[in-house]
Amino acid sequence: MKRPDRRPALLANLRRQPDRDAALQRYARLAHDYEGATTKIRDVRRRAIDRLALRSGETVFDVACGAGAMLPELARRVGPQGRVIGIEQSPQMAALSRRAAIAVGHVEVHACPVEEFVAPRPADALVFVYAHDVQQNPAALRTVFAQARPGARVVAAGLCLLPWWGLPINAWVLWGARHYLTTWHGLRRPWQGLLDWCPDLQIVERFHDGTTYLAIGTVAPP
């Protein structure tokens, strides 16, 4: 692991690409109170699961699953014949995910970078909820979409910046999010990278005065 970036997160996030080492260092500190600090996104998670319209027996990838808050409900939606696969690079967060789903037999959590993920079966649905760094990483997207079935449903949700007139709100958003992602790049249109794989992706809901989006789409054939 490289030496820690000593710059404040607000400045360090000016980097153009996500920084895995920075993310690992930050989430090692954030993990202990992650769910307590992210209560306002619970409704976004719930709406994302609803929009995915999961069916019994399906396999769903929860990409950058964090502390695993969505895993039990995803498992309930796909039923005991389905499979929920969480992907989380932070060992501390992956441990929380496993604990969150400990009572559910058809959930597994892979503690690895998304670009190193190898799925036991292809996905029928994919979840990108507050997974900004992954969405700005072409190698990670290429890896995960290569293991999804054509026509697989995709839901994405997370932060986005308002146009110029929302500058004061944007400043507040950036300050609040400074530790949870490692690059500001792409926050105007954070879903842009997903369009290469899901050309029909569209924004269907907004939350938090327009600074959180929810989008759905389907994986195009190769």
Image (spheres, helix red, strand yellow):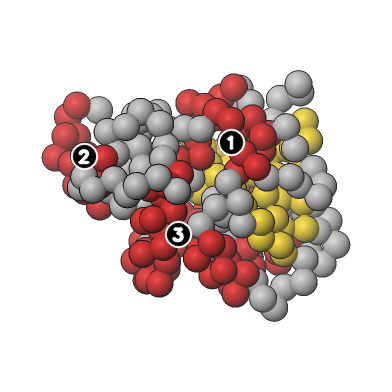
Rendered residue at 59%/22% (across/down): 196
Can residue 87 be seen in the rendering of this structure? yes
Residue underneath mark 3: 43
How many residues crowd mark 2 within 10 Å: few (<14), some (14–19), many (20+)? few
Give the SS element for disc 3. helix
**Front residue of 111 and 72:** 111
State which quadrant residue 159 falls in. top left
Distance, label 2 to label 1, CA atoms, is: 24 Å
Which residue is drawn at the image coordinates 67% and 49% (left, top)?
Answer: 61
Disc 2 + disc 1, Cβ < 8 Å:
no
Residue shown at the point (41%, 40%) measured from the top left: 19
Amino acid at pointer 2? Leu
Determine contact: label 2, label 3, CB under 8 Å: no
Could you tell which of marks 2 and 1 lies nearer the N-terminus?
Answer: 2
- Taking the spot 40% from the left edge, 45% from the top edge, the residue there is 2
Q: Earlier in the sequence, mark 2 or mark 3?
A: 2
